[in-house]
Image (cartoon, rainbow, N blue to C red):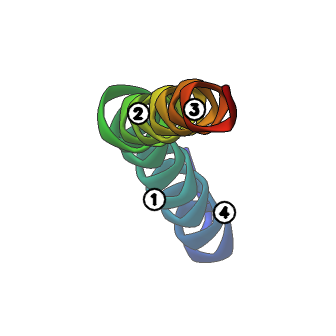
Amino acid sequence: MFDFDQYLGFLAFLTILTIGFWVMIFLLTFVIPYWIGGALIERLKEIKEERKAKRAAH
């Protein structure tokens, strides 16, 4: 069915495909929500500081 070179190529393809799949799962479930959550928290802190600055100016 396969020559040895074709078998090695097929195994390399499956390995790369599997690694890519798990990297995408990791990014979608952990990295991206962590990034968005941190950005939202920082933005809320900036908004609070702007409000405090406005109150202090008056």
Q: Quickly name the residue at label 2.
A: 41
Dots 3, 2 in contact, CB < 8 A:
yes
Q: Mark 1 points at which residue?
A: 15
Location of the C terminus (image quadrant) = top right
50 or 17: nearer the viewer = 50
Residue 40 coordinates in the image, percent (x, y): 49, 27
Secondary structure state at the residue bearing disc 1: helix
Label 1: how many residues lie within 10 Å, few (<14), some (14-19) or many (20+)?
few
CB atoms of marks 4 and 3 within 8 Å: no
Q: In this view, does 17 lie to the left or right of 57?
A: left
Question: Which element carries disc 2, helix, strand or loop?
Answer: helix
The residue singled out by tag 4 in the image is 6
Do the numbered discs 4 and 1 sit on residues whose CB atoms are within 8 Å? Answer: no
Of the image marks 4 and 2, the number of the one nearer the N terminus: 4
Which disc is residue 43 wearing?
3
Q: How far apart in space, not on screen, are marks 3 and 1 (Cα)? A: 40 Å
Q: Which residue is drawn at 30% across and 38% down?
A: 30
Instruction: Work out how far the residue at label 1 is from the one at label 2, CA to CA, in angstroms.
Output: 38 Å
Q: In this view, does 14 lie to the left or right of 30?
A: right
